[in-house]
């Protein structure tokens, strides 16, 4: 209960201590007024200025001269969107009825390391689907799960059925490649199935003033073990650069467990809790407001490195082979060589 109280308190603090996000100026379409409103909103509430070494005053000067009284809403959107892109933050967007600004460079310079056509062949026609999870026994007594979005609800019963399906498996592959995030609640729910004890998994901070460095002390976030079926046998989590936000949070938790190995590419990051506000012209704004740190109080905004770095080989892809899945299977076969699963063993807990 303490972990939930701490995390809830921290989240409430975010909402209580960002007053400018609740101030609603009178409606105006004036380009200068909206430019200044957006710049100030970000200036007082964005959470990564110091970490990213961004000179926000210089950014103001750079884009202010591009704003004119006679510019169209589309031209203003372009200028404001480019200004927000200076933050290099996938959680920061300008939202309108005609377009949404976004920063995609956090993954564009990385290999895809996922091919939907090839991946579909691995799932085949017999994979099961529960709560957004595709799962099957893939080969050599190894279970395989693909979870493509933390926006897809995962119920406790879904997880129970999945683990029961794998009760005779020696190991498990949990694939979250190309998962752009969603709900932190599902990240916690799934991760809680892989630990038998309470664990410190990170910290959260909130803004307590308008200054770029005005943050609270870090509040600890603890993960309670599930009281249902848990999996303590070997696990490989597959990642690529498009693992973002809640997926990054999930990988951050999973890497702490002794039976888990992360294989693939660096995650996309995104450790800032996003917050929504509005400009005087009615346009929506989303931005990172509260940083979530890892257990060592380090930022993972730019991603988490895998334990074993592997890229999909071009020749493999041409032959409908997923290099990363194949390497994970070989790794787990070697790790579990000579072992025999037992539902009553200490490796597999059913409470």
Image (cartoon, rainbow, N blue to C red):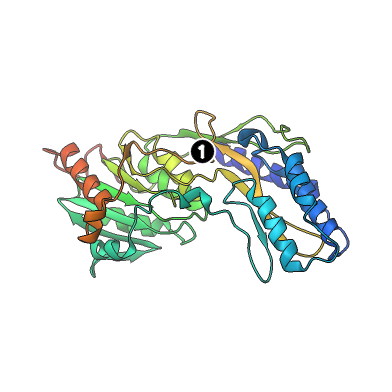
Task: State left or right for residue 237 relative to residue 45.
Answer: left
Task: State left or right for residue 13 relative to residue 291.
Answer: right
Asked which secondary structure carries label 1, the reply is loop
Is 220 or 313 nearer to us in this picture? 313
How busy is the neighbourhood of tag 1: few (under 14 within 10 Å), some, or many (20 plus)?
Answer: many
Residue 8 location (% of width, % of height):
62, 44
Residue 202: tell me if it is visible.
yes
Q: Residue at x 19, y 37 (%)?
A: 335
Q: Residue at x 40, y 38 (%)?
A: 305
Identity of the residue furthest to the right in this view: 26
Q: In the figure, 135 relative to 212: above or below?
A: below
Q: What is the quadrant of residue 257 in the picture?
A: top left
Residue 183 location (% of width, % of height):
52, 54
Q: Residue at x 29, y 53 (%)?
A: 163
Residue 289 location (% of width, % of height):
66, 45
In which quadrant will I find the C terminus? top left
What residue did someone put label 1 on? 300
Residue 180 location (% of width, % of height):
48, 55
Q: In the figure, 87 relative to 23: above or below?
A: above
In which quadrant will I find the N terminus? top right
Q: What is the quadrant of residue 256 in the picture?
A: top left
Is 283 or 150 nearer to us in this picture? 283
Is 25 or 220 nearer to us in this picture? 25
Residue 166: tell me if it is visible.
no
């Amino acid at each position: 209960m303490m972990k939930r109280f701490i995390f809830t308190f921290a989240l409430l603090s975010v909402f209580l201590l960002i007053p400018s996000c609740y101030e609603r100026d009178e409606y105006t379409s004036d380009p200068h007024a909206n430019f200044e409103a957006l710049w100030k909103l970000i200036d007082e509430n964005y959470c990564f200025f110091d970490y990213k070494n961004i000179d926000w005053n210089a950014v103001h000067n750079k884009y202010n001269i591009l704003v004119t009284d006679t510019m169209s809403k589309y031209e203003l959107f372009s200028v404001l969107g480019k200004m927000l892109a200076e933050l290099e933050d996938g959680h920061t967007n300008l939202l309108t009825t005609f377009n949404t600004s976004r920063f995609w460079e956090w993954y564009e310079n990385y290999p895809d390391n996922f091919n939907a056509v090839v991946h579909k062949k691995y799932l085949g026609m017999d994979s099961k689907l529960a709560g957004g999870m595709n799962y099957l026994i893939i080969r050599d007594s190894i279970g395989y799960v693909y979870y493509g979005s933390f926006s897809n609800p995962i119920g406790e019963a879904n997880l129970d059925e999945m683990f029961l399906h794998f009760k005779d498996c020696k190991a498990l592959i949990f694939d979250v490649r190309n998962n752009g995030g969603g709900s932190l609640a599902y990240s916690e729910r799934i991760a809680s199935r892989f630990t038998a004890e309470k664990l410190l998994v990170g910290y959260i901070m909130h803004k307590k003033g308008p200054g770029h460095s005005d943050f609270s002390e870090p509040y600890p976030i603890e993960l309670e073990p599930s009281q249902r079926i848990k999996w303590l046998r070997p696990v490989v989590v597959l990642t690529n650069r498009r693992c973002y936000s809640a997926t990054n949070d999930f990988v951050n938790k999973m890497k702490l467990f002794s039976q888990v190995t992360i294989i693939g590419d660096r995650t996309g990051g995104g450790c800032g809790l996003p917050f929504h506000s509005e400009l005087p012209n009615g346009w929506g704004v989303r931005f990172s407001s509260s940083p979530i740190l890892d257990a060592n109080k380090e930022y993972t905004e730019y991603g988490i490195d895998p334990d074993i770095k592997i890229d999909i080989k071009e020749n493999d892809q041409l032959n409908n082979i997923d290099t990363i899945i194949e390497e994970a299977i070989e790794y787990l076969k070697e790790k579990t060589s000579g072992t025999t699963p037992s539902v009553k063993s200490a490796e597999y807990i059913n409470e």
